[in-house]
Image (tube, grey):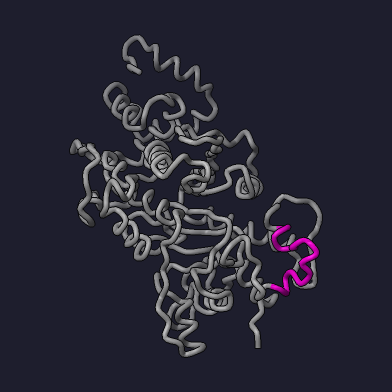
């Protein structure tokens, strides 16, 4: 009998959050929807329902509530559980598939690897493969073995808004025909999830999709808040669905999003924004950035990599740089790579308080790099890096007029910034 998605299995997928160690994550990458990894729809859905988030005994371990996985469950291992389903269900000898096609995963891997290395070596991870032939292998190995899983060091998770995996956004699989039996009418699932702030009810015999959107939003919101992650990174559609969704999720307004101050070599206007959600136990930094695809906005591959290098150096590193690293440069330990001209000065790692202080000062002095700001602050105003003052500044800076503060710093009589 031909496999079809049922309402019950669909409702279970609404609670699947994604991949990685959400409890201890540093960064959550937020996408539109999952692909199928060159597998079929049946094995993708069944593996999620039967095996994801569970140990060998079939008990949920990757979830917020072991007694109710409906509150959110995820998958943190690197086992190909889709291949396991095919072996157990059909007895097939399946070669496990971990694909690194496209630019999405390699770009995320570059960012993660850069965040774990010394600040002076960030640029190495954003070279092209022509500039550094051994870079490709290092990135592929990181994707295959470490990205979106429990690991030592920086931990990154992947989450998607729409819960149903598809091979392409241009394809509506026949296995989902119960959701959309009449193609002459608008797809109710996509209509509801693509406009999460739409008014009115979208409901069919299969499901109440308006309520599904609310439930999905609450599950993901809980994950983002409960996780230790301080960054939500969105790649693609900075002015689209994810921005609308995050505004609804955290009660943000358009004025809460400010443009990301980096140069983008492009023939079009590549929108990119950032916003900060102040939670009880952490600040959650949201970044809405263009999709990493050369020729699709970016002038070429080198321009695309330069853009993400700037974002990493200027914004992500002050928040996450070497947060859980042992201090060793993975670049030199894991693979021999050609230097891009930067060398480490042997200085100690900056603390989290120092990094966050630099992050806030980027707004005051956009013409300066994070490193330039840090060096000048530490030379001229070391008192700014004291922990109590940093905590005070985090609350004070959003309330102050940045221009007045900038002027006061620039025109101090006893000690002066030389910007």
Percent from the top left, x then y, of residue 133? 27, 52
Q: Which residues are magenta?
A: 177-192
Residue ranking furthest to the top: 413
Rendered-image quadrant of the N terminus: bottom right
Asked which quadrant contains residue 300, the reply is top left
Asked which quadrant contains residue 166, the reply is bottom right
User: What residue is drawn where x is 33% and y is 56%?
Assistant: 139
Q: How many marks?
A: 0
Asked if one can make out residue 298 in the rendered structure from this viewpoint, the answer is yes
Asked if one can make out residue 228 in the rendered structure from this viewpoint, the answer is no
Q: From the viewer's side, name the closer residue of 39 and 310.
A: 39
- Horizontal side of 28 relative to 135 (left or right) equals right
Percent from the top left, x then y, of residue 95? 40, 79
Q: Is residue 283 magenta?
A: no
Reply above or below: 156 against 62. Answer: above
Percent from the top left, x then y, of residue 335? 22, 55
Residue ranking furthest to the left: 346
């Amino acid at each position: 009998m031909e496999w079809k998605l049922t309402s019950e299995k669909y409702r279970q997928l609404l609670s699947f959050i994604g991949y990685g160690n959400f409890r201890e994550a540093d960064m959550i990458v937020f996408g539109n929807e999952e692909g199928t990894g060159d597998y079929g729809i049946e094995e993708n859905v069944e593996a999620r329902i039967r095996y994801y988030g569970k140990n060998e005994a079939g008990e949920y371990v990757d979830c917020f509530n072991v007694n109710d996985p409906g509150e959110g469950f995820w998958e943190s291992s690197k086992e190909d559980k889709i291949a396991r389903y095919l072996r157990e269900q059909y007895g097939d000898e399946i070669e496990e598939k971990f694909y690194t096609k496209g630019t999405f995963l390699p770009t995320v891997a570059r960012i993660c690897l850069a965040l774990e290395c010394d600040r002076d070596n960030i640029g190495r991870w954003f070279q092209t493969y022509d500039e550094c032939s051994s870079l490709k292998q290092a990135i592929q190995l990181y994707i295959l073995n470490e990205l979106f899983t429990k690991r030592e060091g920086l931990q990154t998770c992947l989450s998607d808004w729409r819960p149903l995996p598809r091979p392409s956004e241009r394809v509506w699989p026949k296995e989902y025909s119960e959701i959309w039996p009449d193609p002459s009418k608008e797809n109710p699932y996509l209509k509801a999830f693509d406009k999460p702030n739409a008014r009115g009810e979208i409901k069919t015999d299969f499901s109440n999709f308006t309520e599904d959107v609310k439930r999905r939003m609450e599950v993901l919101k809980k994950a983002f808040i409960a996780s230790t992650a301080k960054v939500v990174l969105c790649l693609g559609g900075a002015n689209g669905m994810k921005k609308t969704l995050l505004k609804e999720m955290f009660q943000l307004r358009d004025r809460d999003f400010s443009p990301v101050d980096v140069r983008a070599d492009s023939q079009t206007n590549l929108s990119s924004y950032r916003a900060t959600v102040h939670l009880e136990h952490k600040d959650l930094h949201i970044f809405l950035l263009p999709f990493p695809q050369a020729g699709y906005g970016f002038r070429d591959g080198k321009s695309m990599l330069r853009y993400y290098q700037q974002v990493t150096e200027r914004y992500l590193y002050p928040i996450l740089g070497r947060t859980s690293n042992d201090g060793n440069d993975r670049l030199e330990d894991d693979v021999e790579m050609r230097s891009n001209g930067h060398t480490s000065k042997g200085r100690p790692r900056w603390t989290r308080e120092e990094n966050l202080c630099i992050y806030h000062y980027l707004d005051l002095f956009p013409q300066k790099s994070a490193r330039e700001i840090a060096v000048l602050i530490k030379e001229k105003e070391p008192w700014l890096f004291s922990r109590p003052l940093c905590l005070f500044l985090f609350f004070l800076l959003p309330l102050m007029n940045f221009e007045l503060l900038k002027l006061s710093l620039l025109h101090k009589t006893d000690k002066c910034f030389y910007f």
